[in-house]
């Protein structure tokens, strides 16, 4: 079996397991699957869940595409090769309860030829309300996953997440970060390409225990219209980042990806209230004060 086939099989299994566990946790909705093909080569499985007991909207998508790289992408990646292969799993969950956080995960593999191939990805959390104990739990589990491979992975990838998931025009982070890594190669990490696949699988397998725990902690908390309005404000920031800065969105659009799959990350409802300011001393104001780079959550 070619290495890329091993990656595809592992990523499909991760998609299957996460969908199964999320359905069980939600208890009220099931994923709808749509298989699609890309004109330039390859395709994927888009799985969407909507209007559940916990999950208002979410997607767990798998894709494996290949073909010729557009010139704009070649320039952005700094490569000369025309032919590419890319596969990955991408997840975004928008819950109904404002106390349950938005979560995003992406694991991906990119290949131009035997000499140019790398892994990227990560997990990050976007709470509508930052709860310090939840934030510490989230980062602790990510650190555990990273430490199995290299003690430097977590601090390095945590800094990259802080830098990447940042909204410059708002001067705030999208959430509490997590880990983010890109272009991991044997040359850059000192480990084999097979070990980098194992690391990506470990990241993927961290998703279920992390998110189901955070759902169980918060799903039954009572909320009012005030909390819902704040949730809509935070969702708008999420949408701004994904449409303006997200590299995956840009890559998907520039390589003729499937629009519905690419934009499944957008929330079902969001609001842009003019010059919205939280009440000083409120939980909303506290959350806004913690949306900074460099917070040590562990």
Image (cartoon, rainbow, N blue to C red):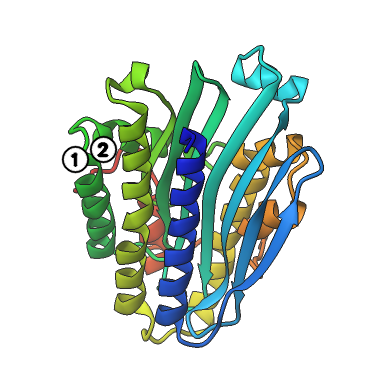
Out of 65 and 208, give the one closest to the viewer.
Answer: 65
- Per the model, the C-alpha gap separating discs 2 and 1 is 7 Å
Q: Residue furthest right?
A: 39
Quick one: label 2 or label 1, which is nearer the N terminus? 1
| Residue at the extreme front of the image, as rendered | 1
Q: Quadrant of residue 29?
A: bottom right
Q: Position of residue 67 (x, y in %)?
A: 73, 31
Question: Is 220 or 111 nearer to us in this picture?
Answer: 111
Circle 1 residue: 147
Query: Can you see residue 266?
Result: no
In this view, the residue in front, 101 or 24, is 24
Element carrying mark 1: helix
Q: Disc count in the image?
A: 2
Side of 65 relative to 4 (left or right): right
Q: Position of residue 52 (x, y in %)?
A: 54, 83
| Residue 66: x %, y % from top left | 68, 35
Position above or below: 193 against 139 = above
Label 2 packing within 10 angstroms: few (<14), some (14-19), many (20+): many
- Specify the label residue 272 is tagged with: none
Q: Is residue 100 visible?
A: yes
Numbered mark located on residue 154 in the image: 2
Q: Is residue 25 above or below residue 235?
A: below
Badge nearest the viewer, 2 or 1: 1
Disc 1 packing (10 Å; few <14; some 14–19; many ≥20): some
Outermost residue, top direction?
A: 80
The image position of residue 250, as x and y in percent, is 68, 37
Q: Secondary structure at mark 2?
A: helix
Residue at the image position 35 percent from the left and 62 percent from the top: 130
The residue located at (74%, 22%) in the rendering is 72
- Image-quadrant location for residue 267: bottom right
Residue in the picture at 23% in, 59% down:
137
Check whether the beta carbons of the residues at disc 2 and disc 1 lie within 8 A of each other: yes
């Amino acid at each position: 079996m070619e290495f890329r086939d091993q990656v595809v099989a592992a990523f499909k299994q991760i998609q299957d397991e996460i969908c199964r566990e999320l359905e069980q946790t939600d208890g009220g909705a099931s994923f709808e699957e749509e298989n699609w093909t890309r004109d330039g080569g390859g395709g994927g499985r888009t799985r969407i869940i909507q209007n559940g007991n916990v999950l208002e909207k979410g997607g767990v998508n798998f894709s494996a595409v290949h073909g010729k790289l557009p010139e704009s992408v070649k320039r952005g990646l700094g490569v000369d090769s025309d032919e590419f292969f890319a596969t990955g799993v991408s997840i975004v969950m928008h819950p109904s309860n404002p106390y349950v956080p938005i979560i995003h995960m992406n694991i991906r593999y990119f290949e131009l030829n035997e000499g140019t191939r790398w892994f990227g990805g990560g997990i990050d959390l976007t709470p509508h309300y930052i709860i310090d104990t939840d934030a510490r739990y989230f980062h602790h589990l990510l650190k555990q996953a990273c430490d199995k491979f290299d003690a430097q992975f977590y601090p390095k990838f945590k800094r990259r997440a802080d830098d990447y998931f940042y909204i410059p025009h708002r001067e705030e982070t999208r959430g509490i970060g997590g880990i983010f890594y890109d272009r991991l190669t044997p040359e850059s990490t000192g480990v084999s390409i097979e070990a980098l696949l194992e690391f990506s699988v470990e990241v993927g397998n961290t998703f279920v225990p992390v998110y189901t725990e955070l759902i169980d902690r918060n799903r039954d908390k009572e909320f009012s219209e005030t909390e819902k309005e704040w949730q809509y404000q935070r969702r708008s920031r999420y949408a701004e980042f994904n449409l303006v800065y997200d590299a995956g969105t840009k890559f998907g659009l520039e390589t003729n990806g499937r629009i519905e799959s690419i934009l499944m990350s957008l929330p079902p409802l969001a609001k842009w209230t003019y010059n919205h300011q939280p009440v000083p001393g409120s939980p909303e104001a506290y959350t806004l004060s913690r949306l900074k780079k460099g917070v040590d959550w562990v």
